[in-house]
Amino acid sequence: RKEVEQDPGPFNVPEGATVAFNCTYSNSASQSFFWYRQDCRKEPKLLMSVYSSGNEDGRFTAQLNRASQYISLLIRDSKLSDSATYLCVVKTGDSSYKLIFGSGTRLLVRP
Amino acid sequence: GAGVSQSPSNKVTEKGKDVELRCDPISGHTALYWYRQRLGQGLEFLIYFQGNSAPDKSGLPSDRFSAERTGESVSTLTIQRTQQEDSAVYLCASSFDRNYGYTFGSGTRLTVV
Protein backbone atom coordinates (compact mmCIF):
# COMPACT_ATOMS: atom_id res chain seq x y z
CA ARG A 1 0.00 0.00 0.00
CA LYS A 2 1.29 3.46 -0.86
CA GLU A 3 2.04 5.75 2.04
CA VAL A 4 -0.07 8.52 0.53
CA GLU A 5 -2.93 7.72 -1.83
CA GLN A 6 -4.93 10.02 -4.06
CA ASP A 7 -7.52 9.59 -6.77
CA PRO A 8 -5.60 10.46 -9.95
CA GLY A 9 -8.65 12.01 -11.63
CA PRO A 10 -8.90 13.91 -13.85
CA PHE A 11 -11.64 15.98 -12.32
CA ASN A 12 -13.20 17.95 -15.15
CA VAL A 13 -15.34 20.81 -13.84
CA PRO A 14 -16.83 24.03 -15.25
CA GLU A 15 -15.63 27.42 -14.12
CA GLY A 16 -17.31 28.46 -10.90
CA ALA A 17 -17.80 24.91 -9.65
CA THR A 18 -16.80 23.65 -6.24
CA VAL A 19 -14.53 20.62 -6.27
CA ALA A 20 -13.07 18.50 -3.47
CA PHE A 21 -10.11 16.15 -3.38
CA ASN A 22 -9.38 13.58 -0.73
CA CYS A 23 -6.14 11.92 0.23
CA THR A 24 -5.42 9.09 2.65
CA TYR A 25 -2.17 8.35 4.45
CA SER A 26 -1.06 5.11 6.02
CA ASN A 27 1.33 6.19 8.78
CA SER A 28 -0.57 7.20 11.90
CA ALA A 29 2.61 8.89 13.18
CA SER A 30 2.41 11.48 10.42
CA GLN A 31 2.62 14.94 11.88
CA SER A 32 2.55 17.54 9.12
CA PHE A 33 0.37 17.78 6.09
CA PHE A 34 0.42 19.92 2.99
CA TRP A 35 -1.15 20.45 -0.39
CA TYR A 36 1.20 21.29 -3.23
CA ARG A 37 0.23 22.36 -6.70
CA GLN A 38 2.12 21.24 -9.79
CA ASP A 39 1.54 22.70 -13.23
CA CYS A 40 2.39 20.66 -16.30
CA ARG A 41 6.17 20.21 -16.65
CA LYS A 42 6.82 22.54 -13.71
CA GLU A 43 8.09 22.02 -10.20
CA PRO A 44 5.70 21.56 -7.27
CA LYS A 45 4.81 24.67 -5.28
CA LEU A 46 3.35 24.81 -1.80
CA LEU A 47 -0.34 25.65 -1.92
CA MET A 48 -1.12 25.44 1.77
CA SER A 49 -0.34 23.63 4.97
CA VAL A 50 -3.11 21.62 6.61
CA TYR A 51 -3.82 22.22 10.28
CA SER A 52 -5.71 20.00 12.69
CA SER A 53 -8.52 22.51 13.10
CA GLY A 54 -8.85 23.01 9.36
CA ASN A 55 -7.78 26.14 7.56
CA GLU A 56 -8.86 28.37 4.75
CA ASP A 57 -6.95 30.50 2.27
CA GLY A 58 -9.25 32.44 0.01
CA ARG A 59 -11.14 29.95 -2.15
CA PHE A 60 -9.18 26.99 -0.75
CA THR A 61 -10.11 25.06 2.39
CA ALA A 62 -8.06 22.22 3.82
CA GLN A 63 -9.27 19.71 6.40
CA LEU A 64 -7.51 16.99 8.35
CA ASN A 65 -9.16 13.94 9.90
CA ARG A 66 -6.56 12.18 12.01
CA ALA A 67 -8.88 9.41 13.16
CA SER A 68 -9.59 8.35 9.58
CA GLN A 69 -6.17 9.43 8.32
CA TYR A 70 -7.37 11.54 5.48
CA ILE A 71 -6.87 15.06 4.25
CA SER A 72 -9.13 17.04 1.98
CA LEU A 73 -8.87 20.10 -0.21
CA LEU A 74 -11.92 22.07 -1.27
CA ILE A 75 -11.75 24.62 -4.05
CA ARG A 76 -14.68 27.01 -4.39
CA ASP A 77 -15.55 29.11 -7.44
CA SER A 78 -13.03 27.29 -9.65
CA LYS A 79 -10.99 29.37 -12.09
CA LEU A 80 -9.39 28.27 -15.34
CA SER A 81 -6.05 28.97 -13.69
CA ASP A 82 -6.76 26.34 -11.04
CA SER A 83 -6.16 23.65 -13.66
CA ALA A 84 -3.16 21.72 -12.35
CA THR A 85 -2.21 18.58 -10.45
CA TYR A 86 -2.74 18.76 -6.70
CA LEU A 87 -0.29 16.78 -4.60
CA CYS A 88 -1.09 15.59 -1.10
CA VAL A 89 2.07 15.62 1.01
CA VAL A 90 2.81 14.22 4.46
CA LYS A 91 5.71 14.38 6.90
CA THR A 92 6.20 11.67 9.50
CA GLY A 93 7.76 12.15 12.87
CA ASP A 94 10.60 9.67 12.45
CA SER A 95 12.15 11.61 9.59
CA SER A 96 10.50 14.94 9.84
CA TYR A 97 12.45 16.49 6.99
CA LYS A 98 11.24 13.99 4.42
CA LEU A 99 8.13 14.84 2.44
CA ILE A 100 6.09 11.87 1.25
CA PHE A 101 4.16 12.78 -1.90
CA GLY A 102 1.00 11.32 -3.30
CA SER A 103 0.83 10.80 -7.06
CA GLY A 104 -1.48 13.75 -7.42
CA THR A 105 -5.02 14.52 -8.52
CA ARG A 106 -5.40 16.27 -11.85
CA LEU A 107 -7.94 19.07 -12.10
CA LEU A 108 -9.20 20.50 -15.39
CA VAL A 109 -11.38 23.58 -15.19
CA ARG A 110 -13.24 24.26 -18.44
CA PRO A 111 -14.81 27.53 -19.62
CA GLY B 1 20.32 33.53 -6.13
CA ALA B 2 16.64 34.20 -5.73
CA GLY B 3 15.58 30.61 -6.25
CA VAL B 4 16.88 27.06 -6.44
CA SER B 5 18.83 26.65 -9.65
CA GLN B 6 19.31 23.31 -11.38
CA SER B 7 21.40 22.42 -14.38
CA PRO B 8 21.16 21.17 -16.99
CA SER B 9 17.43 21.65 -17.50
CA ASN B 10 17.39 18.77 -19.96
CA LYS B 11 19.81 15.92 -20.48
CA VAL B 12 19.67 13.13 -23.03
CA THR B 13 22.24 10.42 -22.50
CA GLU B 14 23.01 6.99 -23.84
CA LYS B 15 22.43 3.95 -21.71
CA GLY B 16 25.56 3.09 -19.78
CA LYS B 17 26.92 6.64 -19.61
CA ASP B 18 27.42 8.56 -16.37
CA VAL B 19 25.58 11.83 -15.74
CA GLU B 20 26.01 14.59 -13.21
CA LEU B 21 23.19 16.87 -12.17
CA ARG B 22 23.75 20.09 -10.31
CA CYS B 23 21.70 21.98 -7.74
CA ASP B 24 22.44 25.45 -6.41
CA PRO B 25 20.22 26.08 -3.38
CA ILE B 26 18.92 29.36 -2.06
CA SER B 27 21.65 31.18 -0.17
CA GLY B 28 21.35 30.51 3.56
CA HIS B 29 19.30 27.35 3.18
CA THR B 30 20.99 24.67 5.24
CA ALA B 31 18.77 21.80 4.12
CA LEU B 32 18.89 20.36 0.61
CA TYR B 33 16.88 17.50 -0.86
CA TRP B 34 16.86 15.50 -4.07
CA TYR B 35 13.67 13.91 -5.36
CA ARG B 36 12.86 11.99 -8.52
CA GLN B 37 9.58 12.15 -10.42
CA ARG B 38 8.83 9.61 -13.09
CA LEU B 39 6.20 10.45 -15.69
CA GLY B 40 2.74 10.48 -14.14
CA GLN B 41 4.06 9.57 -10.70
CA GLY B 42 4.53 11.30 -7.39
CA LEU B 43 7.88 12.48 -6.13
CA GLU B 44 10.25 9.91 -4.66
CA PHE B 45 12.70 11.00 -1.95
CA LEU B 46 16.33 10.30 -2.83
CA ILE B 47 18.65 12.04 -0.38
CA TYR B 48 18.74 14.80 2.26
CA PHE B 49 21.62 17.03 3.36
CA GLN B 50 21.54 19.18 6.50
CA GLY B 51 24.57 21.35 7.09
CA ASN B 52 27.61 19.25 7.93
CA SER B 53 25.61 16.30 9.29
CA ALA B 54 25.77 12.91 7.63
CA PRO B 55 23.26 12.84 4.78
CA ASP B 56 20.19 10.59 4.76
CA LYS B 57 20.80 8.46 1.67
CA SER B 58 17.95 6.05 2.39
CA GLY B 59 16.07 6.92 -0.81
CA LEU B 60 18.87 6.28 -3.28
CA PRO B 61 17.60 3.41 -5.45
CA SER B 62 20.93 1.70 -6.11
CA ASP B 63 24.67 2.08 -5.68
CA ARG B 64 24.78 3.68 -9.12
CA PHE B 65 23.39 6.79 -7.48
CA SER B 66 25.47 9.10 -5.32
CA ALA B 67 25.28 12.70 -4.22
CA GLU B 68 27.59 15.19 -2.65
CA ARG B 69 27.28 18.56 -1.03
CA THR B 70 30.06 20.66 0.37
CA GLY B 71 28.91 22.63 3.40
CA GLU B 72 25.79 24.60 2.56
CA SER B 73 26.53 25.14 -1.09
CA VAL B 74 26.06 23.36 -4.38
CA SER B 75 25.08 19.71 -4.55
CA THR B 76 25.69 17.24 -7.34
CA LEU B 77 23.76 14.05 -8.00
CA THR B 78 25.69 11.49 -10.03
CA ILE B 79 24.15 8.52 -11.79
CA GLN B 80 26.64 5.97 -13.07
CA ARG B 81 25.97 3.53 -15.90
CA THR B 82 22.56 5.03 -16.58
CA GLN B 83 19.64 2.73 -17.37
CA GLN B 84 16.40 3.53 -19.16
CA GLU B 85 14.47 3.31 -15.90
CA ASP B 86 16.52 6.27 -14.65
CA SER B 87 14.62 8.50 -17.07
CA ALA B 88 12.73 10.99 -14.92
CA VAL B 89 12.72 14.56 -13.72
CA TYR B 90 15.22 15.05 -10.91
CA LEU B 91 14.10 17.81 -8.57
CA CYS B 92 16.19 19.56 -5.99
CA ALA B 93 14.71 21.55 -3.12
CA SER B 94 16.15 23.57 -0.30
CA SER B 95 14.82 24.96 2.94
CA PHE B 96 16.05 27.23 5.69
CA ASP B 97 15.79 24.36 8.13
CA ARG B 98 14.24 20.89 8.21
CA ASN B 99 11.10 22.35 9.80
CA TYR B 100 10.58 24.98 7.13
CA GLY B 101 8.90 24.69 3.78
CA TYR B 102 10.76 23.57 0.70
CA THR B 103 11.46 25.60 -2.41
CA PHE B 104 11.91 23.42 -5.46
CA GLY B 105 14.08 24.05 -8.46
CA SER B 106 12.62 23.55 -11.92
CA GLY B 107 14.31 20.18 -12.24
CA THR B 108 16.53 18.31 -14.68
CA ARG B 109 14.65 16.17 -17.19
CA LEU B 110 16.83 13.13 -17.81
CA THR B 111 16.19 10.88 -20.77
CA VAL B 112 18.22 7.72 -21.17
CA VAL B 113 18.12 6.30 -24.70
Image: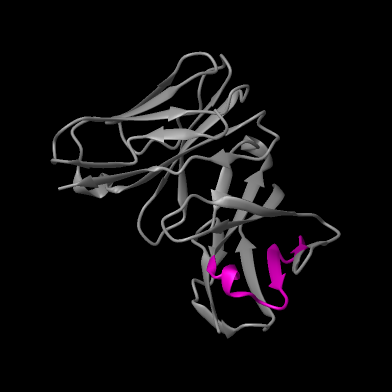
Q: Is residue A106 left or right of residue B16?
A: right
Q: Is residue A23 left or right of residue B113?
A: right
Residue A27, image x, y percentages: 63, 53
Comparing B36 with A82, the one in front is: A82
The correct choice, above or below, for B85 with respect to A20 in the image is: above
Colouring mode (rainbow / by chain / secondary structure / one colour): one colour
Q: What range is drawn magenta here?
A: A63-84
Tell me the residue at 46%/56% (across/down).
B42
Residue A72 highlighted magenta (yes or no): yes
Quarter of image, res B78: top left
Quarter of image, res B40: bottom left
Residue A61, image x, y percentages: 76, 67
- Total marks placed: 0
Q: Is residue B113 left or right of residue B9?
A: left
Comparing A13 with A65, the one in front is: A13
Comparing B39 with B56, the one in front is: B39
The correct choice, above or below, for B23 with respect to A2 in the image is: above
Tell me the residue at 51%/34% (across/down).
B4
The correct choice, above or below, for B39 with respect to A73 in the image is: above
Can I make out residue B30 in this image? yes
Residue B98, image x, y percentages: 65, 31
Q: Quadrant of the N terminus of chain B?
A: top right
Tell me the residue at 46%/53% (across/down).
A42
